[in-house]
Amino acid sequence: MTKAVIFDMDGTLFQTDKILELSLDHTFNFLRSQNKWVNETPIDQYRNIMGVPLPKVWETLLPDFTIQERDQVDAYFLERLIENIQHGNGALYPNVEEIF
C-alpha cells in the first residue's frame, strides 16, 4: 500500500509572506497598466484580511469589479505567486528540508 502525506505548506512550511505582498503589488501594477486601478496597492488593507479565501480578498479589495473581473485578477495573482516561487523569492522555513 502506498502512503502519502499532504501538507498545508502555506505559512506552515513555506514562508508565504515573502511572495504574497510582492505578487499583490505585481497584480495591482498590472491593473494600473490596464487603466483599471489608479491608487496605491492596498497592502495595508490586504494585511488586515490576510488568510481569508481569495474570493473574499478580491471582493474586499476590488468591490467595484465584477465577479468575472475578480476571477481574472485572481488568475493573474496566482500566476505571479508561482512566478515568484520559481524565481526564488519565497523560502521554506529554516530546517524544513533537514526534517523531511
Image (cartoon, rainbow, N blue to C red):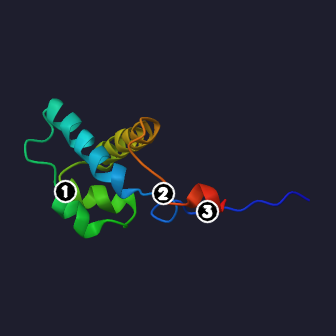
Left or right of 76 in this view: 65: left
Q: Residue pushed farthest left?
A: 39
Q: Residue drawn 36% across and 46% down?
A: 74
Sequence-wise, the earlier of marks 1 and 2 is 2
Tag 3 secondary structure: loop
Q: Residue drawn 45% across and 63% down?
A: 11
Q: Amino acid at mark 1?
A: Ile
Q: Foreground residue, 27 or 75?
A: 27
Task: Answer whether labels 1 and 2 touch (C-beta < 8 Å).
Answer: no
Q: Residue drawn 45% across and 51% down?
A: 91
Left or right of 14 in this view: 56: left
Give me the C-alpha separation between circle 2 and circle 3: 10 Å
Q: Position of residue 89 (x, y in %)?
A: 38, 43
Tag 2 secondary structure: loop
Q: Position of residue 4 (x, y in %)?
A: 76, 59
Q: Amino acid at mark 3?
A: Phe
Residue 82 is at least partly visible in this image: yes
Report which quarter residue 27 is drawn in: top left
- Residue at the disc numbered 3: 7
Q: Residue drawn 35% across and 43% down?
A: 77
Kindly identify which numbered label has been placed on residue 14.
2
Q: Is residue 17 above or below residue 38?
A: below
Foreground mark, 1 or 2, reads 2
Sequence-wise, the earlier of marks 1 and 3 is 3
- Residue at the disc numbered 1: 43
